Amino acid sequence: QLTPFPQGFMWGASTSAYQVEGAWNEEGKGPSVIDHAVFNAELSDFKVTSDHYHHLQEDIALFAELGLKTYRFSISWARLFPEGTGEINPLGVAFYQRLIDLLGQYHIEPLVTLYHFDLPWALQQQGGWSNPETIAAFEEYARTAFRLYGDRVKYWLTINEQNMMILKGEVIGTLPADTPDPQRALYQQNHHMMLAQARAMIACHQMLPTAKIGPAPNISCIYPATSRPEDVLAANNFSAIRNWLYLDLACFGRYNATAWSFLKEKGYLPQITDDEMALLRQGKPDFIAFNYYASATVGADSAKDKPESGAANRAVDQQMAGIDRSVYVGVDNPYLQKNQFNWYIDPLGFRITAREIYERYRLPLIVTENGLGAFDELASGNKIYDDYRIEYLRCHLEQLQQAISDGVEVMGYCPWSAIDLVSTHQGIGKRYGFIYVNRDEKDLKDLARFKKKSFFWYQQVIRSNGED
Ligand code: BGP
């Protein structure tokens, strides 16, 4: 007998500012690291994306029609503070005010990410997260957001996928290319981000006593390649480095012992002080948000000894970038299907992950990303038959409900993404939305919005509180 989704369950959907807004240099917005990053020239850039900035009313009306109870979006730090700190941009302030007001009109609860990969370029030029002054800049920005929007926004997320920014430092991180000893520098950045997060959580609790705030890492289910103890140990180590390092710091204010010994062995230990550790213990989240897309399977044999075993191997390697490939190797999982981008589809892994997080930290969970990227086809009559996405989401929701029945406290589910937007490394062609945006990689067309088949499916799911 399955436990029903709780009353007031936060049925939602997610986006992030740089992937959906466009208007990259309009109305006083400063540049961010994304505007200076070099991506594949064949793919769409982040200048216009889905042009949500200029389609705000239309998009929020569509989200209301979809039935969203919650909308997760991020504030572009550089839209509020073009220089990262100091002078505030009134037009940026007004844009998010408008967005939040519109959500209010439709009774959609805002869930706001403070920082989703787009560090202001001005801060990056001063060393980004390697510079401890960025910690104070983040706190100032967070306090400003709490002051401006705290009367309406009750749910806050600190930093999106901090673990991915560290593990894939060279791709989405903020490490300048010529940094000596890059791994060590990344773990120092990680420490600074943790301090910034703790300061934001403390500020949130001081300024908005009824608001709730939490971290939003990407957590993956890690399987051992076989039942050979060496493989199990490898999976255990990998999970500590990939997942628990981040949540242990956020929730317990301490370094995960296994991860710490890995950092020590590799010479990646950050510099930390007792005062900083006291601050980390003081800043506590109210809930844990997590993004889940796929699981990974790892073995103990070093990559040196094994030839590449194909796409799955690369998929795991992608997740392990930043971790010495001679330590762990990603292996194929013959029990799982893959999507068009070679990510494993693993709904049961989703349930396992939710249980694992809950058992470790005993905080309510909210899923802030989960979804299927695919090359959707626009059929005649502007229809999009994305049955594969419905299938993916349905199976994951089933397992989420199983997790709830297992006793896991789940506040909500916000799949990625509310509307099509630009994927960081694969352009607009890799779509996730319930709403299609009519454009190609380079041809902006008319940016018209079309409801996909999954839109109507999700609408019914929300209407029935997950019964359908
Ligand atoms: C997460 C990010 C999102 C989004 C998503 C899908 O890591 O938080 O910003 O991009 O992954 O990833 P992709 O677009 O690479 O398929």
Image (cartoon, rainbow, N blue to C red):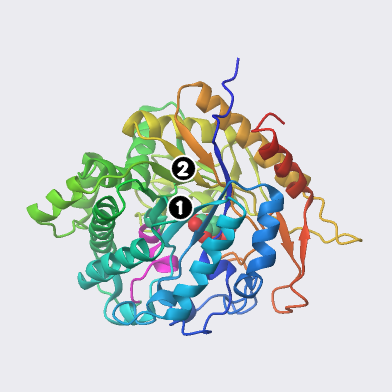
Residue 81 location (% of width, % of height): 37, 77
Q: Residue at x 56, y 37 (%)?
A: 333
Residue type marked 2: Ser
Residue to which mark 2 is pinned: 220
Q: Is residue 429 visible?
A: no
Dividing the picture into quadrants, the one containing residue 184 is bottom left
Residue to which mark 1 is pinned: 319
The front one of 418 and 292 is: 418
Give the magenta-colored segment's residue range: 165-176
Tell me if label 1 and label 2 are in contact, CB under 8 Å: yes
Closest to the camera, between mark 1 and mark 2, is 2
Does residue 136 appear to the left or right of 97 in the view shown?
left
Is residue 170 within the magenta segment? yes
Q: Secondary structure at mark 2?
A: loop
Dividing the picture into quadrants, the one containing residue 468 is top right
Q: Is residue 438 above or below residue 337?
A: below
